[in-house]
Image (spheres, helix red, strand yellow):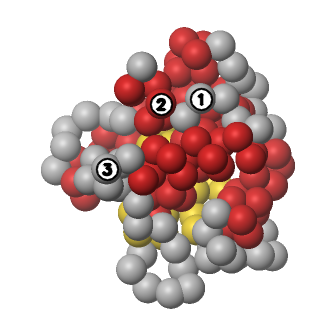
Amino acid sequence: MSSPEGSSVIFRRVPADVRPRAIQAFARKLQREVAKGRPFHLLITGDAELARLNRDFLGKDYATDVLSFPSGTKPFLGDLAISAARARAQAREFGHSTEDEIRILMLHGVLHLTGMDHETDAGAMARAEKRWRARLGLPNSLIERVRS
């Protein structure tokens, strides 16, 4: 599903509790506001594909909720991959919708694509994610969950 603005969202299988158009609209919003107009691609898939991508590109042999692959070239920002199964499980755990969880994962991934890294930046990404989460009306961020 491509948008005229450039970012695209591909669903391997659309989760029953997720509206593809709402996710595409959020991708366009992230592109405009967080990515400063730079497009990105998002793949929403399952644990098996996330595990394969994680293994093939990062050398880690397990599934995760979101992966970010910065492009390193302008104007394209990069690629994101999100596990729908992990998003659904985390949404249940934290008491919000699967759609909200996918949005949280999208924000987290886009911040990584812009060059932020919560493992090395002394809290800069956590602060940015908290500000964006509030501005976008999202529940607690990934980084806040890890720290609590």
Q: Which mark is residue 122?
A: 3
Residue 62: % across, % down: 25, 34
Q: Is residue 91 among the parts visible in the rendering?
A: yes
- Nearer-the-camera pick, 53 or 143: 143
Decide: few, some or many residues near mark 2? Use Cα within 10 Å; few <14, some 14-19, many ≥20: few
Q: Is residue 72 left or right of residue 27?
A: left
Q: Mark 1 is on which residue type?
A: Asn
Q: Position of residue 122 (x, y in %)?
A: 31, 50
Residue visible at 42% across and 53% down? 124
Identify the residue under disc 1: 140
Local crowd size for mark 1, using a 10 Å CA cut-off: few (<14), some (14–19), many (≥20): some
The three-letter amino acid code for the residue at tag 2 is Glu
Query: Answer yes or no: do the residues labelled 2 and 3 have beta carbons within 8 Å?
Result: no
- Dot 3 crowding, Cα within 10 Å, few <14, some 14–19, many 20+: few
Image spot of residue 83 (x, y percent) = 49, 37
- What's the distance in space between the residues labelled 3 and 1, CA to CA? 19 Å
Specify whether residue 85 is in view.
no
Q: Are marks 2 and 1 in contact (CB under 8 Å)?
A: yes
N-terminal label among 3 and 1: 3
Residue 27 found in image quarter? bottom right
Q: Residue at x 39, y 80 (%)?
A: 72
Left or right for 18, reference 78: right
Q: Secondary structure at mark 2?
A: helix
Residue receiving disc 2:
144
Q: Earlier in the sequence, mark 2 or mark 3?
A: 3
- Secondary element under disc 3, as helix, strand or loop, is loop
Residue 22, given in percent of the width and then of the height, sits at 82, 45
Q: CA distance from mark 2 to mark 1?
A: 6 Å
